[in-house]
Image: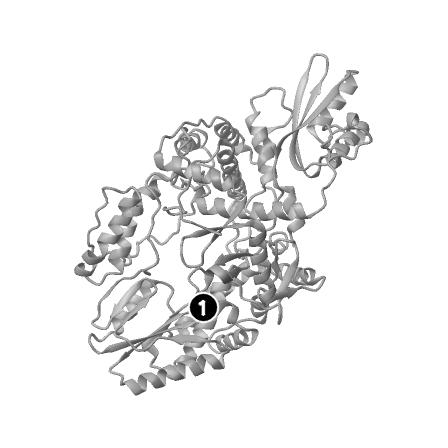
Amino acid sequence: MELTHYGYSLKNIPRCSKDAYLKALITRTEDFLIRLRWKAFFFLLGPEPPDEEMKETYGFRSNKSPPVVNELVAFESDIYQLIASIKFRHAPSTFLDRLDSDAARIKSSTTALIPTDKTSQHYRIPIDEYQRLIESSITAEYRKAPAGTAEHIENKAASIAARLDLKGRMQRFETSQAFVLLKDHKPNFATNLPCRLINPAKSDVGRVSKKILEKFTAQLRTSSSVNQWRSTGEVISWFETNCTPGHVQFLQFDIESFYPSISENLLDRALQFAQEHINISEEDIDTIKHSRLSLLFCPRGETWQRKDSLFDVTMGAPDGAEVCELVGVYLLSQIGDILPQQSHGLYRDDGLVMLTDTPGPRMERIRKDLFATFRREGLKITVSPPSTSVDFLDVTFRSDGSFRPFRKAEKVTKYVHRQSNHPPSIIRNIPEMIADRINSISSCKEVFDDAKPYYEDALKSSGYMDSCMTYNTQAGEAKPPRNRRRKRRVLWFNPPFSVTVETNVGRKFFNLLEKHFPQDNPLHKILNRNSVKVSYSCMKNMECLIKSRNKQLLRQHQETQEPTTRQCNCRSRNSCPLDGKCLSKSVVYMATLRTENEKHHYIGMTEGTFKDRYNGHTSSFRLERYRNRTKLSEKIWSFKDRGLEFRIEWKIIRRGHGYRAGQNSCDLCTSEKLEILLRSSDPHLLNSRTEILTKCRHKRKFLL
């Protein structure tokens, strides 16, 4: 085991390859054009009836392909041409050279880089030991799920999706594999290697539950008048309102392992409490409770569940934080029996009590009552002794009424570097955002001036040499509401940003918008510079690269434990269409069709074996009823009609991986679209550009 510390924030983004950028651009463009088609289609269809209610989709998009809108065809063609004509350049930067060098070492590493739980450090661990750590952490808390458990959960989820009329939108369980974080702050770390197990598996029902809980918890906070904080600013506002300088003492408490400690009985009591204050239907409760049925997936592909039941509140669940907030409101109501209502509050699992002129015996009685209250709910807490100063979240509060920035001693502050491959608007605003943050958590100018040298040094170490923070009394204050009542419906285009791209994508996009939708165009009302905006998105940062490499190493290690599979099952290698590799999976291939005077190319892809796809092609060449199945079969039948002899050559041009539940895009489909786009100027290419906007067919098998 070797400690690795990179000396910069892992949020920094290295240079990306040409293929990686174009794939991201195709994905973002496809997403934009799909939304654009739907918007134009409904706009041209006419206004909706005033009494027609909008369908609640909970953020799930339709998986139907949008209809072709004739008014958009020319614009879409120019957008495709824009992608194909992207020019790249060399962007010299010593910092990016360093990032690229580290990224290359990460991608070629044979050991896993495991992050720590509390700091930004990483440890290099052999992959077999990393898998052993994951499996030992799993077996300590989980047991293997009986056969059919996942199907039972998904069947119930399908019934919920049908009730909400979302069956064509919601997907099956996301089977992301569990991983661990190292707790290097624990004693005897080097010998025991204590870990925190993270379960990232998610359910789409959890996304529905998240929306429901957000609405109910907001109503519950208002009706019960408890202090459940959701930001540092709310804590500061409470402190300034209720603090009597020189007369207060603080008690700080922390709920141990809050997420996994929430039992089914505790959630039932919280829901029952909520029903006493607000209206919650039985269908909503059923959805919330079903989202708590959780499974864990290990690197070996096995399915696990918690030892006592399927009920679990995982840290990676879509509604995990919202469940904690609902339970938190209930817990605050119980604490209200032993404390004045405005004297305490809770942020997730961190609680703070501020009492005025309270004698020592009374403080000790309150501490014991807190222990007893949480013990009744099946929770354990730690309570700090009474003090006149407390470090809560990222602020230190003092009894004299002042507050100042707080950071843990072992934590080194690092910001995104000025030369990072981020959009310029982000880089430009970082110093101002940091200054505003320090201003908002400083009670006065003296406190700000005392704290700012550390953060200015951190900014300078990240390349912001001219940064100088100044005190602003209005920092952090809410801006006055605007008089505008109508919310403008803006359509956003989010192309990826990279310093290696010479083409100004945003400018060219707006030029195309003005060219195709002038004021006399019927779509100008919804497609103009006020209703369509551009905001650059980011490529993968260093942290994402490390996570991807760890997953890849685990997958490769698992493959070495399995028996090797055959690469070809042809009777003789000479008859194999791919020279002995016809059983390759998840590939993009190219077929070259030749006659005596003509040559044509066809690009396709398959998630299964190439041999199965090849057999499908050959059947369309033999049977005339399948002549229109592909552009390749159409061309071959046209040769047959003309009596021409032809031959076909096959080769793999790219490898990828198919769509998995929960992913934003399909790597295999994007790879095929990229190859078609890069060859779109080839007059011999049989594929059409319209294939770029086709929906991923691999998603269908994951729909509920």
- Would residue 612 be found to the left or right of residue 137 on screen? right
Instruction: Determine whether the residue tagged by mark 1 lies in a helix, strand or loop.
Output: helix
Residue 694 at least partly seen: no
The residue at the point 77 percent across, 30 percent down is 620
Closer to us: 236 or 60: 236
Residue to which mark 1 is pinned: 325
Q: Position of residue 459 (x, y in %)?
A: 28, 47
Residue, far front: 191
Q: Position of residue 585 (x, y in %)?
A: 68, 38
The residue at the point 47 percent across, 74 percent down is 278
Does 426 appear above or below 475?
Answer: above
The residue at the point 28 percent across, 75 percent down is 387
Does 313 appear above or below 38?
Answer: below
Q: Amino acid at mark 1?
A: Glu
The part of the image, by quadrant, that contains residue 657 is top right
Tally the marks: 1
